[in-house]
Image: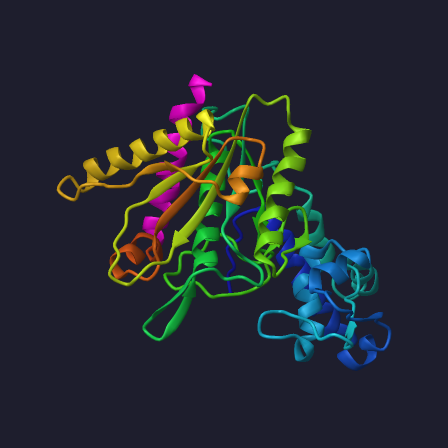
Amino acid sequence: MFIFLSNMKEIKTIFTFFAFLIFFNICGWAQSSDSLKTVVAQKGDGIYKILRENGYPAKDYYNAFKSINNNKIGLEDQLIQGETYFLPPFIEDIAEETSETNDSILIINDSIVQSNGLLYADTIIDKQLDGAIFYLISGHGGPDPGAVSEINGKQISEDEYAYDITLRIAKKIEEHSGKVFMIINDPNDGIRDDELLEIDYDEYCYPDAEIPRSQNQRLIQRADAVNDLYAENKKYKYQRVIIIHLDSRSTGANVDVFFYHFPGSKKGEATAKILQQKFSDKYAEFQPNRGYEGTVSPRNLLVIRKVLPPAVFIELGNIQNEKDRKRFVNPDNRQALAKWIVEGLIEEYPDN
């Protein structure tokens, strides 16, 4: 079996999970579970919260926690109040106990530190975005899948496609030397080339915070994450927030990609207009008889109102409409969307 890993972050996540499985294959479930620490879930507890409060890098141990507690975790990864849960062993402990019988763990672990500093791209192509910072937010995530639809009896959700496209944007930005912060992350989903993306509920908010069930709290959480990072990066003159969503309307509503900016934000409006023009140009080039009706408009949405850097909120299409779904169900189209967005950002950047 071959597994393609697109970046070092994904390698570390996969390593953590498989090292954990190797540990239980060697030590045995009955023997090892006796020595594991336990915790009782309280009201409001989730996997990320419990791991973080017990000293774990939550995003790296999420799947290990699920593996040893799989009969006590809900369909949306929720915990049961009052239930006792095992805490996974730390990787350092696994390596010590298995180093004599399984050297491959240590070999894999050595490879983790060999990184070129890029989180999403394999190589840098040019310097066109050198000195620019982008905060990328994919819509929904965690307990909230966003808009849902069904294709051939299989349910698909907004958050999975928004996340995949946002990852592709992150990779393209890094290829052009830009700096990226993914505000919403998934510990085990990299860029996927499937048409129907599996729904899960393990996304977290930067740096490793569990996503709340309350919509208002979710939006404030991701805006606060951006603002905390912005405070650390004030020396960078060009910073932008890009938010990716899919719309949900009636099945007959076919809409083009459209863009929102916060009312009165001149920089946000300028970025939105350049992106909209890029899409108009691309449709004229590749589908000259189609036309393009994507718009730019101000909207007082909570996240773009609260974040400090200029922000653009992008709606990529109607998940309920069959024609719109082709825009993001097809992985080549997802890649094209990401490419066009980054080309627009490159076009704007030299002027700021």
What range of the chain is rendered magenta? Answer: 331-352
The structure's colour scheme is rainbow
Q: Is residue 310 left or right of residue 111?
A: left
Judged by its main secondary structure, the magenta piece is helix
Is residue 75 visible in this depiction of the protein? yes
Query: Looking at this view, is 131 or 155 the one in front?
Result: 155
Q: Is residue 33 left or right of residue 308?
A: right
Magenta stretch: includes residue 2: no
Q: Is residue 96 left or right of residue 120?
A: right
Residue at far top of view: 351
Magenta stretch: includes residue 342: yes
Is residue 104 visible in this depiction of the protein? no
Q: Using the image, determine if residue 156 lies above or below residue 34.
A: above
The picture places residue 204, in percent across and down from the top left corner, at 62, 54
Picture quadrant where residue 346 is located: top left
The picture places residue 132, in percent across and down from the top left corner, at 53, 26
The picture places residue 220, in percent across and down from the top left corner, at 61, 47
Name the residue located 47 percent from the left edge and 18 percent from the top edge: 352
Name the residue located 23 percent from the left edge and 39 percent from the top edge: 283
